[in-house]
Image (tube, rainbow, N blue to C red):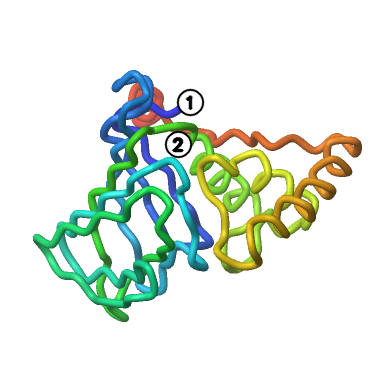
């Protein structure tokens, strides 16, 4: 479980996520993270957070954002809000520099757990080049499990529910789990190994 100050590194997508405030810190009201995306980083295809507002504040670099089919590049100091239910996708709009964005998710829901799962799977080489679970059964299980937090714009949600729901049932029967831990190096542990 993430704590303020913890960092996730996704070696596939090139995204570092540093937790500022977790669901536990805010009684579930807010998840606040720093996203530091290397050139080429993207959140993937257009998606929706049906119950969450997502606020982006660009601290440095250039953030590309498509929000409700309008695509723009945002620079340092700009703030963009994707309302709950709005389709969006984000990416590093620079081919040379990192982008650093402060991101708020309101309410927090289980978003930090979803980030941990994807980073853990990527760390263990269990994702495709886009950072999604490479095994279709595991992909369906994770997407079905986190449908309240996120779903893709395409195919339509009703189609996703039928397909991912059926595949998720098969995945559970075969022993797959929707949760996959990320091995944090706690600061106290890191300082002990340096000594």
Q: 126 above or below 32?
A: below
Q: Residue at the spot x=19%, y=70% of the render?
A: 74
User: Foreground mark, 1 or 2?
Assistant: 2
Q: Is residue 86 left or right of residue 180?
A: left
Q: Is residue 21 left or right of residue 140?
A: left
Q: 104 above or below 59?
A: above
**Secondary structure under the numbered disc 2 in the rendered image:** helix
Please identify the quarter of the rendering in which residue 187 is found.
Answer: top left
Tell me which numbered mark, 1 or 2, is placed earlier along the sequence: 1
For marks 1 and 2, give the CA distance. 8 Å
Image coordinates for residue 135, horizontal then vertical, percent: 77, 56
Q: Residue at the spot x=33%, y=45% of the render?
A: 53
Residue 162, visible in the rendered structure: yes
**Secondary structure under the numbered disc 1 in the rendered image:** loop
Dot 1 and dot 2 residues touching (CB under 8 Å)? yes
Q: Residue at the spot x=9%, y=60% of the render?
A: 77
Q: Residue at the spot x=32%, y=69% of the render?
A: 65
Q: 54 above or below 30?
A: below
* Residue situated in front as seen by the camera: 16 or 133: 133
* Residue situated in front as seen by the camera: 33 or 187: 33
Image coordinates for residue 166, horizontal then vertical, percent: 84, 48
Q: Residue 70: which numbered mark, if any?
A: none
Few, some or many C-alpha atoms within 10 Å of disc 1 (few <14, some 14-19, many ≥20)?
A: few
Image coordinates for residue 168, horizontal then vertical, percent: 79, 44
Residue at mark 1: 1
Residue at mark 2: 112
- Exactly how many numbered labels are in the figure? 2
Residue 195, visible in the rendered structure: no
Image coordinates for residue 185, horizontal then vertical, percent: 44, 32
Q: Is residue 104 left or right of residue 135?
A: left
Few, some or many C-alpha atoms within 10 Å of disc 2 (few <14, some 14-19, many ≥20)?
A: many
């Amino acid at each position: 479980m993430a704590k303020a100050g913890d960092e996730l590194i996704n070696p596939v997508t090139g995204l570092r996520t540093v937790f500022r405030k977790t669901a536990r810190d805010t009684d579930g009201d807010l998840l606040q993270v720093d996203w530091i995306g290397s050139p080429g980083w993207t959140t993937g295809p257009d998606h929706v957070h049906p119950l969450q507002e997502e606020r982006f504040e660009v601290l440095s670099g250039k953030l590309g954002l498509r929000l409700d089919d309008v695509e723009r590049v945002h620079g340092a100091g700009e703030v963009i809000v994707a309302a709950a239910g709005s389709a969006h996708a984000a990416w590093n709009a620079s081919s040379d520099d990192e982008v650093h964005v402060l991101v708020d998710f309101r309410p927090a829901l289980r978003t930090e757990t979803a980030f941990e799962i994807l980073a853990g799977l990527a760390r263990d080489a269990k994702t495709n080049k886009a950072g999604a679970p490479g095994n279709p059964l595991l992909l369906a299980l994770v997407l079905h499990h986190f449908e309240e937090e996120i779903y893709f714009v395409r195919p339509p949600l009703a189609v996703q529910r039928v397909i991912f729901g059926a595949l998720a049932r098969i995945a559970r029967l075969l022993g797959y789990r929707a949760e996959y831990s990320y091995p944090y190096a706690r600061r106290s542990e890191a300082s002990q190994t340096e000594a």
